[in-house]
C-alpha cells in the first residue's frame, strides 16, 4: 500500500471512530458565533445593512470618473432614475469596494436606435476594471461575449434574459475580488455570479483580468476600488442602486 493510501485510510478510520463515540446530538450543535440580524427590504429595496448608492433623489455617493472631486454629471429624473449624459463621461462611487453584493436596476431607451453594440450600451464596472455588460439584446444580435450580462470579452452569459426596451431590468451581482500578495503577484482570481431579472447568467465565473475592447485581459495588483457606470453615448437609465460589503 502506498503511503498516501495508508494515510487516507488511517484518517478515515479515525473519523469513523470519533463519530462512533458521539452519542449525544447536542455534542454537534454550534451556538456561537450567532449570525447578526439583517432586515430584508421589500420589492428589491435595500436591506438594513446595505449602503444606498442611489435613492432616486441625489448623487452624493457618485463622482465624475474624469475628476473624482467633481459631482456626477448625469441627469437625475423625476421618476427616481439617473440617466447617462452622453459625452459627460463615466461616473463612479466616491467610496471604494472589494467583495460585495451589488443590486442595480437599468433601463434601455424605449425608442430603439441602432443595432448590435450601438443599442442601449453601458456597463457596470467592478473595481473600475471588470465590466458586466449592459446592452439592449432583446431581439438584437451581437457577439456573444459582448452581449447583455457578459463579462465583457471574457465570459458569455448562460442565457439571454433581456426584457423589452423601455422596461426596467435588474442585476444582482455577487463579487469576490482577486487577491494579490505583497509582491503584487495574483494569488487568486476574481469571481462573479450575476442574476439578470432573477435568472442566473454567470455562476461563480472566473474573471481573467481587466475588460479590454482591444486585446487580452490584463492583470495588475490593486486594492479596493470604486464601482463605475459607463457613458457609452446611449441614454441608459439606472435606479435603486445599493451594495453590501462582504
Image (cartoon, helix red, strand yellow):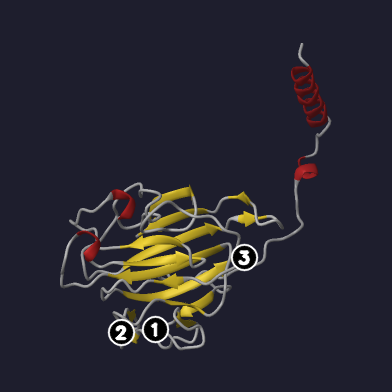
Q: Quadrant of residue 104?
A: bottom left
Labelled disc at residue 211: none
Side (left or right) of 91 relative to 39: left
Number of numbered callouts drawn: 3
Q: Nearer the viewer, residue 85 or 76?
A: 85
Q: Quadrant of residue 124?
A: bottom left
* Above-or-below relation of 190 to 44: above
Name the residue at 37% across, 71% down: 230
Residue 45 visible in this rendered orientation of the protein: no
Q: Which residue is mark 3?
A: 223
Mark 2–mark 1 distance (CA, rounded to whole Å): 8 Å
Circle 1 Cα neighbour tier, 10 Å, few/some/many (<14 / 14–19 / ≥20): some
Side (left or right) of 12 relative to 236: right
Q: Which residue is mark 1?
A: 56
Q: Quadrant of the N terminus?
A: top right
Q: Position of residue 188 (x, y in %)?
A: 61, 49
Of labels 2 and 1, earlier in sequence is 1
Name the residue at 49% across, 87% down: 60
Which numbered mark, 3 or 1, is in the foreground of this view? Answer: 3
Q: Nearer the viewer, residue 232 or 34?
A: 232
Q: Nearer the viewer, residue 190 or 160?
A: 190
Q: Which residue is mark 2?
A: 79
Circle 3 Cα neighbour tier, 10 Å, few/some/many (<14 / 14–19 / ≥20): few
Q: Quadrant of the C terminus?
A: bottom right
Side (left or right) of 94 relative to 30: left
Q: Quadrant of residue 50?
A: bottom right
Q: Are circles 2 and 1 on residues that touch, CB within 8 Å?
A: yes
Amino acid at each position: 500500500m502506498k503511503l498516501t493510501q495508508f494515510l487516507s485510510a488511517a484518517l478515515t478510520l479515525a473519523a469513523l471512530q470519533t463519530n462512533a463515540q458521539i452519542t449525544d446530538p447536542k455534542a454537534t450543535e454550534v451556538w456561537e458565533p450567532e449570525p447578526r440580524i439583517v432586515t430584508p427590504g421589500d420589492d428589491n429595496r435595500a436591506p438594513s445593512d446595505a449602503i444606498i448608492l442611489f435613492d432616486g433623489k441625489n448623487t452624493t455617493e457618485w463622482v465624475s470618473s474624469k475628476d473624482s472631486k467633481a459631482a456626477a454629471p448625469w441627469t437625475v429624473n423625476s421618476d427616481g432614475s439617473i440617466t447617462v449624459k452622453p459625452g459627460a463621461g463615466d461616473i463612479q462611487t466616491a467610496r471604494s469596494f472589494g467583495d460585495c453584493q451589488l443590486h442595480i436596476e437599468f433601463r434601455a431607451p424605449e425608442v430603439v436606435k441602432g443595432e448590435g453594440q450601438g443599442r442601449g450600451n453601458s456597463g457596470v464596472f467592478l473595481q473600475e476594471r471588470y465590466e458586466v455588460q449592459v446592452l439592449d439584446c432583446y431581439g438584437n444580435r451581437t457577439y456573444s461575449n459582448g452581449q447583455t450580462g457578459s463579462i465583457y470579452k471574457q465570459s458569455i452569459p448562460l442565457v439571454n434574459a433581456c426584457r423589452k426596451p423601455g422596461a426596467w431590468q435588474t442585476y444582482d451581482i455577487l463579487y469576490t475580488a482577486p487577491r494579490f500578495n505583497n509582491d503584487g503577484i495574483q494569488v487568486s482570481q476574481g469571481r462573479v455570479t450575476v442574476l439578470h431579472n432573477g435568472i442566473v447568467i454567470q455562476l461563480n465565473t472566473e474573471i481573467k483580468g481587466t475588460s479590454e475592447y482591444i486585446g487580452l485581459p490584463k492583470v495588475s495588483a490593486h486594492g479596493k476600488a470604486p464601482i463605475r457606470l459607463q457613458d457609452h453615448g446611449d441614454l441608459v437609465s439606472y435606479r435603486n442602486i445599493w451594495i453590501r460589503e462582504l
